[in-house]
Image (spheres, rainbow, N blue to C red):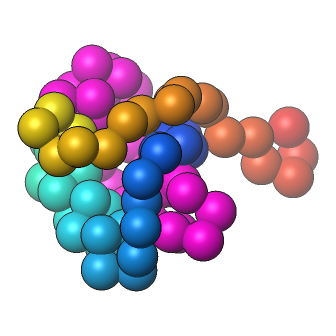
Amino acid sequence: MKKTVYVDDLCCERCAKQMATKIALIDGVRAAKGDYKKQRIHIDVSDGVTDEQILQVFEGTGMTVLSIEKRKGIFG
């Protein structure tokens, strides 16, 4: 399943990469890539990964998660 995490205060490319790396350490996350210009992180997760697990990564970082949304592909 692919998800997009929309984040407030993702200030630079380095921050985006660091957060993507931290999310990728969660068991069940296959890939994560940050995009600081659009303030989001794209992730590919197994069905067992919860939004709460993703939110825990951001605790104490000073960043605010605006939403976590399921990503739709071009075929639906």
Taking the magenta stretch, the answer to whether it contains residue 21 is no
Taking the magenta stretch, the answer to whether it contains residue 35 is yes
Examine the image and state in which quarter residue 38 appears: bottom right
The residue at the far bottom in this view is: 13
Locate residue 35 relative to residue 48 in the image: left or right: right
Locate residue 35 relative to residue 32 in the image: left or right: right
Q: Which residues are magenta?
A: 28-57
Q: Position of residue 25 (x, y in %)?
A: 13, 54
Locate residue 1 relative to residue 70 in the image: left or right: left
Is 46 situated above or below 17?
A: above
Going 26% across and 59% down the picture, which residue do you hit? 19
Examine the image and state in which quarter residue 58 appears: top left
Going 31% across and 62% down the picture, which residue do you hit? 20
Going 61% across and 31% down the picture, which residue do you hit? 70
Is 1 situated above or below 74?
A: above
Is 12 situated above or below 57?
A: below
Look at the image and tell me in which quarter the C terminus lies.
top right
Is 41 situated above or below 13?
A: above
